[in-house]
Amino acid sequence: MTYQVILLKDNIPIVNTAQVSISDAASKKVFNLNIIPNEEQFIQIESDFPSGYWKIEANYGDKSVKRFFSVGAREEVEFSIENDNLIIRNAGNTRYTKEVQILIGDQVVKQMQSIDVGSFKQIKLVAPNGEYDVEVTDGTTTMSKKNVYLAGTGNVVGVIDKELLESTPALGSVRESPDSGVSQKNATLPIIFIIGVLAISILLTIERVMKRRVSKN
């Protein structure tokens, strides 16, 4: 992209250095440049530049001018298979939100995706022990790999989203919540109380036995 900062005084071009700041709407990418006014400047729009409006601001002394331009959305994805894991990488400049179809042997699994710019998702492929031809497509991008060894799920053919597993407690575990009204300290009280009662009961039983023995003697 080319741009030019026009800087004049009494209609005469000023050749002193001016400062230019170029940034996306969320300020995730910011470029601070020193440029010569009245000369054409160039900035390369890279593939990882977020889509949407960008701001270009020129400053000279106490003067400042802002202009806006837009970067078009480019939805692009890269698929790869490492061992029994499918890697879906967002290589575009906008959130990747497409349905991905995964063909494992002759079984098709469909899964909606929502992957942020520059991020990736790892999905485990599962099937009865053996080697399978795997193909992945979103209707635009397709990749395939032959003789992928998968194992360990009985007769089930499918995928396991590791991101969902990490955000969900394992079966049988307990997650303490700040709003639950029960802290870990309070949870130990009933246990201590039960142990205390049991100890008293044992002491009373011993005491009764000792009294009987004394009375017999």
Image: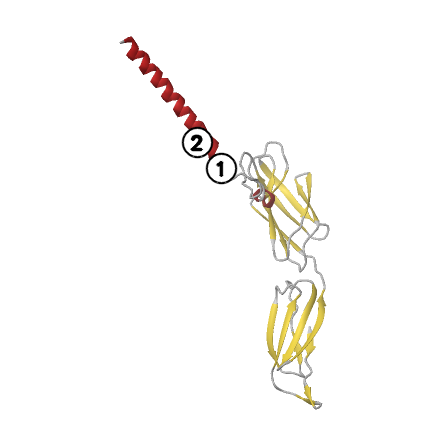
Question: How packed is label 2: few (under 14 Cα within 10 Å), some, or many (20 or more)?
Answer: few
The residues bearing labels 2 and 1 have C-alpha atoms spaced at a distance of: 10 Å
Amino acid of disc 2: Ile
Seen in the picture, residue 215 relative to 105 is either above or below; the reply is above
Mark identifier at residue 192: 2
Where is residue 215? Give x, y as percent.
30, 10
Residue drawn at x 67%, y 47% is 136
Q: Secondary structure at mark 2?
A: helix
The front one of 197 and 85 is 197
Q: Secondary structure at mark 1?
A: helix
Where is residue 94? Give x, y as percent.
68, 58
* Image quarter of residue 61: bottom right
Where is residue 190? Give x, y as percent.
48, 31
Task: Identify the colour scheme used.
Answer: secondary structure
Residue drawn at x 32%, y 12% is 212
Figure label count: 2
In the rendered structure, are the residues bearing label 2 and label 1 in contact, judged by CB atoms less than 8 Å apart? Answer: no
Where is residue 171? Give x, y as percent.
56, 35
Q: Which quarter shows the N terminus?
A: bottom right
The front one of 170 and 207 is 207
Task: Tell me: 166 left or right of 200.
Answer: right
Q: Check disc 1 and report the residue beneath it.
A: 186
* Image quarter of residue 126: top right
Q: Which quarter shows the C terminus?
A: top left
Seen in the picture, residue 96 relative to 132 is either above or below; the reply is below
